[in-house]
Image: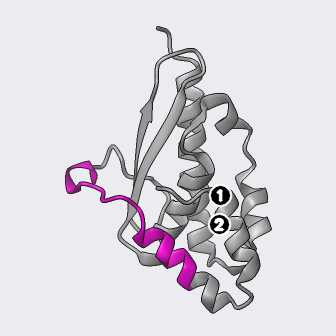
């Protein structure tokens, strides 16, 4: 994924209509790299999402590793939300991931007001999973 969270913020600021913002979110999801069907397993599935969401975590070695995430959803809007979360979290050190306030970012983008309760809960589940994986990476014994 090449779209940064800063680019997403800038693009959102130019889009005044929510219909345009939703279309943009869908486009972000369509731009995600392909996600292999073999990775669509129960182990990778994010629990608590109404739509199916899968997340694969890759981490470097070290006490505070860089963590990258691959994700996918079978729903267009949710896939775009996955893309936003990947832009926010992927490619950062575990300690940075733990410190990121995803709720503040969603509020800044206005998504907190425009998501259904089910989608918002699913997004929170994804954030919890990402932060849990970052916490686990920090506590691994080499």
The residue pinned by badge 2 equals: 8
Position of residue 34 in the picture relative to residue 115 (left or right): left
Vertical relation: 51 (above or below) 36: below
- Residue at x 65% of width, y 66% of height: 8
Position of residue 16 in the picture relative to residue 3 (left or right): right
- Residue at x 53% of width, y 25% of height: 137
Pinpoint residue 99: horizontal percent, then vertical percent: 74, 38
Dot 2 falls on a residue whose secondary structure is: helix
| Residue 36 painted magenta | yes
Labels 1 & 2 near each other (Cβ < 8 A): yes
Residues under labels 1 and 2: Cα distance? 5 Å
Please state which of residues 22 and 135 is positioned toward the viewer in this rendering: 22
Pinpoint residue 23: horizontal percent, then vertical percent: 54, 84
Pinpoint residue 69: horizontal percent, then vertical percent: 46, 45
Q: Is residue 112 visible?
A: yes
Position of residue 125 in the picture relative to residue 54 (left or right): right
- Residue at x 48% of width, y 63% of height: 49
Q: Circle 1: is it few (<14), some (14-19), or many (20+) Cα within 10 Å?
A: some
The residue pinned by badge 1 equals: 5
- Residue at x 69% of width, y 34% of height: 96
Q: Which residues are magenta?
A: 23-40
Q: Quadrant of residue 109?
A: bottom right
Dot 1 falls on a residue whose secondary structure is: helix
Q: Main secondary structure of the magenta part?
A: helix
């Amino acid at each position: 994924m090449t779209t940064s969270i800063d680019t997403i913020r800038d693009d959102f600021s130019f889009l005044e209509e929510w219909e345009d913002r939703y279309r943009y979110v869908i486009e972000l999801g369509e731009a995600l790299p392909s996600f292999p069907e073999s990775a669509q397993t129960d182990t990778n599935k994010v629990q608590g999402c109404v739509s199916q969401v899968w997340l694969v975590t890759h981490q470097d070695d070290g006490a505070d590793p860089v963590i990258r995430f691959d994700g996918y959803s079978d729903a267009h809007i949710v896939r775009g939300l996955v893309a936003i979360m990947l832009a926010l979290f992927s490619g950062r050190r575990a300690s940075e991931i733990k410190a990121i306030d995803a709720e503040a970012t969603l509020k800044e983008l206005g998504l907190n007001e425009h998501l259904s309760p089910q989608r918002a809960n699913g997004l929170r589940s994804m954030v919890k999973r990402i932060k849990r994986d970052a916490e686990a990476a920090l506590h691994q014994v080499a």
